[in-house]
Image (cartoon, grey):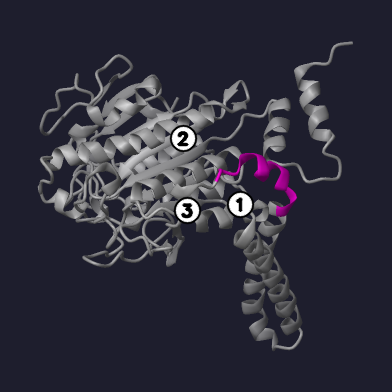
Amino acid sequence: MPITRRQFFRNVSASAGALTLTPILQQVRAQADGVKLPPRFVFVMEGNGLPPAQVTPLDIKRQRNLDKMIDVSLTKMKLPESLHPIAPYQDRLTVVNGLSGKIAGGGHSNDFGALGVYNCGSGVGSSGTAKGETIDVALGKKLGGIFPHVGLGMSGRVEHNVIYNCSAWGKNQPVPTICQPMTAYGSIFGSVAGGNSKAEFNAKTNLLDFLRDDVKRLQKEVPASERGKLESHLAGYEAMRQRQSRLGEIEGTLRKVAPKVNDKFTSDVECDRLDAQFDIAAATLIGGLSRSVTIASGVGNPYFGVKFTGLGIDFGKHGIGHGGSYNGMTSSQMMVKIRKFHFQLIHDLMKKLDAVPEGDGTMLDNTVVIYLSDAAEGHHSRCWEWPFVMLPGKHTGIKGGRYVEYPYWGIAGHRETGNLYTTFLHAAGDKREYFGVHDAMLKGDATGDGPLPHLLA
């Protein structure tokens, strides 16, 4: 009697026996049970502003103070040069213009406010304070994973290992952006790595065992009034130790998906390091280790002055933002060249996800890639509008293949970045009314809670 596909998946899952199911087998089992797979989200954020013209289809003639919403098919439009690398995925491409984020404040960077929709009080040389959770982390909390959220990136200084620049778990709880590919590799794939990474993984596991046992002993010796603090510490150590244990249990999966370490992982060239971070992001997603990844390229104060010497641009992005030229290239030409490089990396990541079967399609069908800048529409942003480029999979609940532009700030029908982030949350199953803080200057039909219905599939 022939076995059905559903029975096969069930048998494969059951055959794992006493072993903890790997993330991939858990997804297979959900598929066999007919459960809709949750989406995953990849945020790619580039520092130093995003002029809307660089991502707007050439067929669209934008107008000042737009007073009516535009919602049209983008699938046959001519793409600007910046977006040429993702032309193979144009049927998924959605560009959103017209959303404002003035609550974040503006300037060289909005730091945590770019993904948090609040003013974090940043200034020149300072990244401000996390005033609440950011959307990437909020999605990670909802969707789960051994790592609820993974933050990767690149700053302008090769010696930076970990920075705190754009993502946060909650108020005064920034989460790290790992800038060194080898550090990221060791943190995520250390259990199967060789050399120092493996040794550090084992040492961390042993240390967490010691700290957990030590706190348990102390609980018996301190007054009852102090036990609550120790319980909080114990919970944190238990969570980290559980993560180490789960990573150890899925060594087979990790060995299959871990990226191959090569020279770009230790390169002094920023383009190489960013390329390596995209490799790590792809492996993290394919291995089922996280459903929320942020890749921050020169994001936040004071990290936005990064150079892209690997592209032949030995000139900082701060100078580019001020209209400088270099080696015969105008500021606009340099911006486009750098942006095009980012979209090539996005294309390569998407291609890797598209090669992995999942459900009735591929992993890419269950993934949303979002590209934005931490500085909204320009180098010295005012946040009147905040352009977004999205590449949603067909099973994510977000519409692809659209050009959407909302009425200008203050005009009826205008909406904010918080509405877009609320849309992502609704697609992930979190039905909260609004994410972030509303712009207090907006009134009536120019503001409002809820998701953006035109973007929900």
Q: Position of residue 446 (x, y in %)?
A: 23, 39
User: Residue sitting at 31 percent across and 37 percent down?
Assistant: 341
Calculate the distance from the C-alpha at mark 3 to the C-alpha at mark 1: 11 Å
- Give residue 9's mark: none
Magenta span includes 250: yes
Magenta stretch bounds: 248-260
Q: Is residue 382 above or below residue 66?
A: below
Q: Position of residue 65 (x, y in %)?
A: 12, 34
Name the quadrant of the C terminus: top left
Q: Name the side, left or right, on which 382 lies relative to 291.
A: left
Residue nearest the viewer, comparing 260 with 414: 260
- Give residue 189's mark: 1
User: Residue sitting at 68 percent across and 70 percent down?
Assistant: 208
Question: Is label 2 in a helix, a strand or a loop?
Answer: helix
Q: Is residue 151 above or below residue 129?
A: above
Give the amino acid type for the residue marked by disc 3 in the picture. Answer: Pro
User: Residue sitting at 86 percent across and 40 percent down?
Assistant: 17
Q: Name the side, left or right, on which 4 lies relative to 387.
A: right
Residue nearest the viewer, comparing 451 with 203: 203
Q: Position of residue 319 (x, y in %)?
A: 15, 53
Question: Which label's residue is closer to the chain start, 2 or 1?
Answer: 1
Give the amino acid type for the residue marked by disc 1 in the picture. Answer: Phe
- Image quarter of residue 197: bottom right
Crowd around label 1: few <14 · some 14–19 · many ≥20 (10 Å): many
Residue nearest the viewer, comparing 21 with 424: 21
Question: Which label's residue is closer to the chain start, 2 or 3?
Answer: 3
Quickly name the residue at label 2: 349
Single out the mark in the foreground, 2 or 3. Answer: 3
Question: Which label's residue is closer to the chain start, 3 or 1?
Answer: 3
Quickly name the residue at label 3: 181
Calculate the distance from the C-alpha at mark 2 to the C-alpha at mark 1: 18 Å
